[in-house]
Image (cartoon, helix red, strand yellow):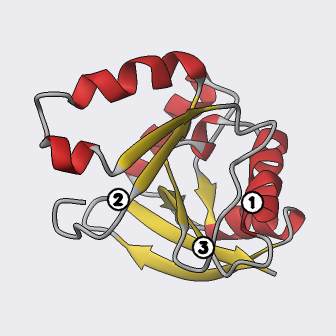
Amino acid sequence: MKQYPHLTAQVFDRDQIIKTAATFWVGKESAKLLARISYQAGNVLEAIPAAKNDKDIYLLSAVLHSLADQDCIKILRNLAIAIADTGARIAIMELVVPEFKADISSAACDMQMFMATRGKERTITEWQNLFDQAELMFEELIQLRSIGKILVLKQR
């Protein structure tokens, strides 16, 4: 947001997170930048604020890997409703494990998700299956410098 002063952002998260999020950045970032960020409490499993146009993008970073497939599909369906007929996109930043012979980092992350949550790290085929069930179209895979990737989705 520092590099693109024309952008605005809305943080959508659970009530307890939203209550502290706005005050956390005060004094750490400029008031001018903070004025371009709004906050809304809610539950992604219930509903997600609607997109306004094709300039909107929903970013989920390390959210879905901690959830079971059914909850991922519910969130993805809510996102599909939110972007309906707008041209907005969804960007999901997650680990994508190899289909075969996962590296030690991917395997360790997957084991951690298995032990700590109901989620898991997913292959591109598993991600695609979730997107299909949510009636979203997988548009692009962006490689990051880290082990993560960005999966870009649009309305089907």
The residue under label 1 is which amino acid type?
Ala
Residue in the foreground of this view, choosing between 27 and 92: 27
Q: Quadrant of residue 137?
A: bottom right
Tell me where residue 85 appears, x and y as whole percent: 79, 78
Q: Which residue is mark 1?
A: 82
What distance separates the C-alpha of mark 3 from that of mark 2?
A: 22 Å
Label number found at residue 147 = 2
**Residue named by callout 3:** 89
Query: Which of the two marks, 2 or 1, is nearer to us in this view?
Result: 1
Residue at the spot 19% in from the left edge and 28% down from the top edge = 26
Judged left or right of residue 88, residue 155 is right
Nearer the observer: mark 3 or 1; the answer is 1
Quadrant for the C terminus, please: bottom right
The mark total stands at 3
Residue 106 located left or right of residue 115: left
In the rendered structure, which amino acid carries the disc numbered 2? Answer: Ile
Q: Is residue 52 above or below residue 68?
A: below
Q: Which residue is rendered at x = 70% and y = 32% of the image?
A: 43
Amino acid on which the number 3 mark rests in the picture: Arg
| Label 2: how many Cα within 10 Å (few below 14, some 14–19, many 20+) | few
- In the rendered image, which quarter is residue 64 located in? top right
Asked which secondary structure carries label 1, the reply is helix
Q: Position of residue 116 (x, y in %)?
A: 57, 21
Vertical arrangement, residue 106 with respect to residue 15, above or below: below
